[in-house]
Image (cartoon, coloured by chain):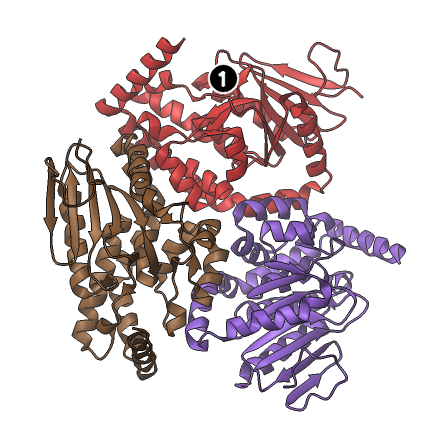
Chain colours: A red, B purple, C brown
Amino acid sequence: PPSPLQPPGLPLAPCRSFSNNKIQVELDESSGVAMMKFKSPPVNSLSLEFLTEFSISLEKLENNRACRGVIITSAVPKIFSSGLDITEMCGKSLEHYTEFWRAVQEMWLRLYGSNMVTVAAVNGSSPAGGCLVALSCDYRIMAENPKFSIGLNEAQLGIVAPFWFKDTFVNVVGHRIAERSLQLGSLHPAPEALRLGLVDELVPEEKLMEKAAAVMAQWLALPDHARQLTKTMMRKAVLDRLVAHREEDIKNFISFISKESIQKSLRMYMEMLKKRK
Amino acid sequence: PPSPLQPPGLPLAPCRSFSNNKIQVELDESSGVAMMKFKSPPVNSLSLEFLTEFSISLEKLENNRACRGVIITSAVPKIFSSGLDITEMCGKSLEHYTEFWRAVQEMWLRLYGSNMVTVAAVNGSSPAGGCLVALSCDYRIMAENPKFSIGLNEAQLGIVAPFWFKDTFVNVVGHRIAERSLQLGSLHPAPEALRLGLVDELVPEEKLMEKAAAVMAQWLALPDHARQLTKTMMRKAVLDRLVAHREEDIKNFISFISKESIQKSLRMYMEMLKKRK
Amino acid sequence: PPSPLQPPGLPLAPCRSFSNNKIQVELDESSGVAMMKFKSPPVNSLSLEFLTEFSISLEKLENNRACRGVIITSAVPKIFSSGLDITEMCGKSLEHYTEFWRAVQEMWLRLYGSNMVTVAAVNGSSPAGGCLVALSCDYRIMAENPKFSIGLNEAQLGIVAPFWFKDTFVNVVGHRIAERSLQLGSLHPAPEALRLGLVDELVPEEKLMEKAAAVMAQWLALPDHARQLTKTMMRKAVLDRLVAHREEDIKNFISFISKESIQKSLRMYMEMLKKRK
């Protein structure tokens, strides 16, 4: 049967596909599994536009009773997502910062709180916000390429991961590993990420989609209702914490990002990235 | 010296033994260690009667100053306990559900909050409520038989482990392992259970009782008072949470279990169990 | 360039050194790293005088903008610190107990909440309060000598680690390992301490200082501000808990320590220690 996992280009008869600018989504209604592919070169930055599309795509799938699970991966080679788009945080208006940060929150609230089974097929590096996307899924499979790394490396840029990034991280790797990794802003190569529990398994890159489909099938074998209630029980405290402090979190972000010292750090970082190319 | 660990049938001079219908208890007053054996074939289901006997037995031992520790094991081959008795949750009155659920809570409050040293000698499979009993002890030794499995597999039956099952589980294996295992309703074979930290060690089945006695002796070498205060410090938050929400938890259980869809799932599950025999 | 890591006795040109009775401190202003050496033979007991010096030393370094990190180690062979000085808790006045306990709290609040990078170079055994000192640092390196052990062994003495010792421990090793280790009052030999995550790495004793300097350099490579905010985010909840319950914690300590049974235990323990010599 046609599957969202087959090579792109082949006919996908029973699939509903909706592709926007930055994310391609294909839903295989027979299996109930959607494939969501980040296709925003060069590095799948989480720009305001990307985040908006991401949230809308999640909402569409969530409201589609034919969809029970989503596999999230990248259509860009070597990178899953490079995280929040720094250009959105640099030299913009307070209104823009507010809108951007609300979009980051919105994406996380939808993804971490999704009723669908969410599997991250991490087929490239995944720093900062890219790591958050993976951490927010139910299961993380990573290509076993030691050149690919993953982590919440905000501290390296002189910025601080917000408390709900931290809460999500602690729920995956525990307090000690999170404390050390966040302070050092570590980017963990795939084998180390596995050892720390940051990802659940590594597979050769060419097997990644096959494995993601198999894991999804295993999770979908459970009755949705019981699985969803269980997921809510596990994640509600952390989700509620952001919901309760959402405006405060936006204010904190704006006041932090507006500091001249932080703006300078970010500009230097962007310069460095440009020079690398 | 006579010990509760010697084969049944031999004279146990200094032992006080009280056996009810479903649980056999022998207290060796010289060592201060009680042996509690589940003997409710075929699978040591936690029925209302079983739970009531369990709580009363724990209370008797708790109030007996000669008793400092209890080893919990099964007298039924291949099964430690199959968990909550589904017949108590199927086609009964609301009054019955209330009484049953209060008995489940009572058992857990007594066991998880016990001042005695509690060692689970898991000599068979231990799904759902059976796993909860093991998780609520201070130490878990399991027979190293890969056919024996243990886990909170409620989700497999379409039901949801209550929050205090989850809290107990998280306190043993951490948030991430609990989140995944609960959503998948996993039953972990003994070697995997050890790897996840769900049990503390595996020993060959014939060495299980000897090992349990040795572990008990190690824990009893500590002064009771300091050990008990330490245990309370570690477990109080989770115990208090149920105490504070006990009636609400009963209401939740009743409203969930009374749903026709859940009743149907449970009936199907019971049919399947009957056919297996 | 001269470094605080070079052998004592050599000239340390750019270093500010202040040595009190019990702790020697040398700050290398070029690297921003202070070396703090416990030198209170025979076992670096945390007496009232020691704790006062410790807190004052930390405060001085904290307020010195030239200091960004501190390496804590022992100048006494085979022992890092033996923990709280039992003579301070035995046969003294209530006023003394109050003053002593406040000094213990003060030391921990300063160390666990320090804005500096704190690395423990554990070059000897480290029971009880000595273990707390190590646990409160950002990173723990221990000499790989299986004769050296570390742990919160209070229960062995018939006393109970206070809740904030427990919180600090849980933040490092997780709930399950803490629950078991605290109840058994375990002293873990270095290899076991590594396996449990109680220390971060083991190195041969002669490489300890070199390794501590390398780890410190790695942590200092991060921008201070982001690292400090991240550290605060990870530790604030546990620090706030003691701050909110500080007077109550003192009362608890006094009422516990004043019990005749506890006084008797401590006297017996001190007798045992004297006989060992």
Q: State which quadrant residue A84 falls in.
A: top left
- Left or right, residue A63 beside residue C60: right
Q: Is residue B252 above or below residue A207?
A: below
Identify the residue under disc 1.
A44
Res. B114 in view: no
Point out the image quarter for the C terminus of chain C.
bottom left
Q: Is residue B148 above or below residue C4?
A: below
Coordinates of residue C96 in the picture (x, y in percent): 17, 72
- Left or right, residue B31 beside residue C68: right
Viewer-proximal residue, A222 or C145?
Answer: C145
Q: Is residue A25 above or below residue C203?
A: above
Crowding at label 1, few (<14), some or many (≥20) Cα neighbours within 10 Å?
many
Q: Which chain is home to disc 1?
A: A
Residue, x 46% and y 77% (percent of image)? B224
Q: State which quadrant residue B226 falls in.
A: bottom left
Coordinates of residue A272 in the picture (x, y in percent): 33, 14
- Left or right, residue A40 beside residue A65: left
